[in-house]
């Protein structure tokens, strides 16, 4: 019985020591050196004709709307119309300021395009650890304004 007690005590002590180990110091996170890191990833996927799905999430009503294939060209057109002048320094993000989220789902990666207002958005992946790409849409053609696109989709379609 004494052997069992000592063995159990030893196992508990060893397992509790594992909880206090600091393994995070070995994780090497990349630093975002460019303002358009996620944009470049998305453009690569578009140019390789990787299939994708698009959904619009309305943060005011907490409803999701599926975007049909005929409207996906607006998303690709938006990304193709961006220039380096559209990428801005990070702005303060507040959770209550999000109007819409466009979810772009590729086979192995999901990106979120968060619309803050009519002219400001940011791009981040579902599981990203690099700072988001911030974009100013004020100088983009009105046909590709994502705020207007989200309003159109949410007014036209029934939620999922």
Image (cartoon, helix red, strand yellow):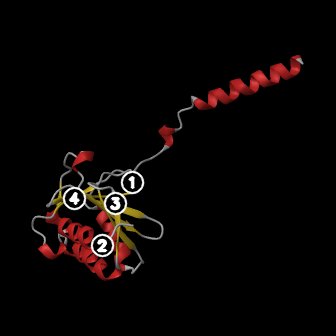
Note whether 36 is above or below 94 in the view shown.
below
- Residue appearing at x 23%, y 69% in the figure: 155
Note whether 111 is above or below 15 in the view shown.
below
Front-most of residues 51 and 29: 51
Question: Mark 3 = which residue?
Answer: 63
Q: Nearer the viewer, mark 2 or mark 1?
A: 2
Q: Closer to the N terminus: mark 2 or mark 3? A: 3
Measured from the top left, where is residue 18 in percent x and y?
Answer: 62, 31
Q: Which mark identifies residue 157?
A: 2
- The secondary element bearing badge 3 is classed as strand
Question: In whole angstroms, how far apart are the C-alphas of marks 1 and 3?
Answer: 24 Å
- Residue appearing at x 40%, y 56% in the figure: 126
- The secondary element bearing badge 2 is classed as loop
- Looking at the image, the residue that sits furthest to the top is 2
Question: Mark 4 = which residue?
Answer: 121
Q: Quadrant of residue 104?
A: bottom left
Front-most of residues 74 and 11: 74
Q: Closer to the N terminus: mark 3 or mark 4? A: 3
Q: Closer to the N terminus: mark 1 or mark 3? A: 3
Question: Mark 1 = which residue?
Answer: 128
- Residue appearing at x 59%, y 31% in the figure: 19
Left or right: 85 in relation to 29: left
Q: Closer to the N terminus: mark 2 or mark 1? A: 1
Measured from the top left, where is residue 57 in percent x and y?
Answer: 32, 61
Q: Closer to the N terminus: mark 2 or mark 4? A: 4
Measured from the top left, where is residue 49 in percent x and y?
Answer: 39, 81
Dot 2, crowdedness within 10 Å: few (<14), some or many (≥20)? few
Q: Split into 4 quadrants, where in the image is the N terminus?
A: top right
Q: Which mark identifies residue 4?
A: none
């Amino acid at each position: 019985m004494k052997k069992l007690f000592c063995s159990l005590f030893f196992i508990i002590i060893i397992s509790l020591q594992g909880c206090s180990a600091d393994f995070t110091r070995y994780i090497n996170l990349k630093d975002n050196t460019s303002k358009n890191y996620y944009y470049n990833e998305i453009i690569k996927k578009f140019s390789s004709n990787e299939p994708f799905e698009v959904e619009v999430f309305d943060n005011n009503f907490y409803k999701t709307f599926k975007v049909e294939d005929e409207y996906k060209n607006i998303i690709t057109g938006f990304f193709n119309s961006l220039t380096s002048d559209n990428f801005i320094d990070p702005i303060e993000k507040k959770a209550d300021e999000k109007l819409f989220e466009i979810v772009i789902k590729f086979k192995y990666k999901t990106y979120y395009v968060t619309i803050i207002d009519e002219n400001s958005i940011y791009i981040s992946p579902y599981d990203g650890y690099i700072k988001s790409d911030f974009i100013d849409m004020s100088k983009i053609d009105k046909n590709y304004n994502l705020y207007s696109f989200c309003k159109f989709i949410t007014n036209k379609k029934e939620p999922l």
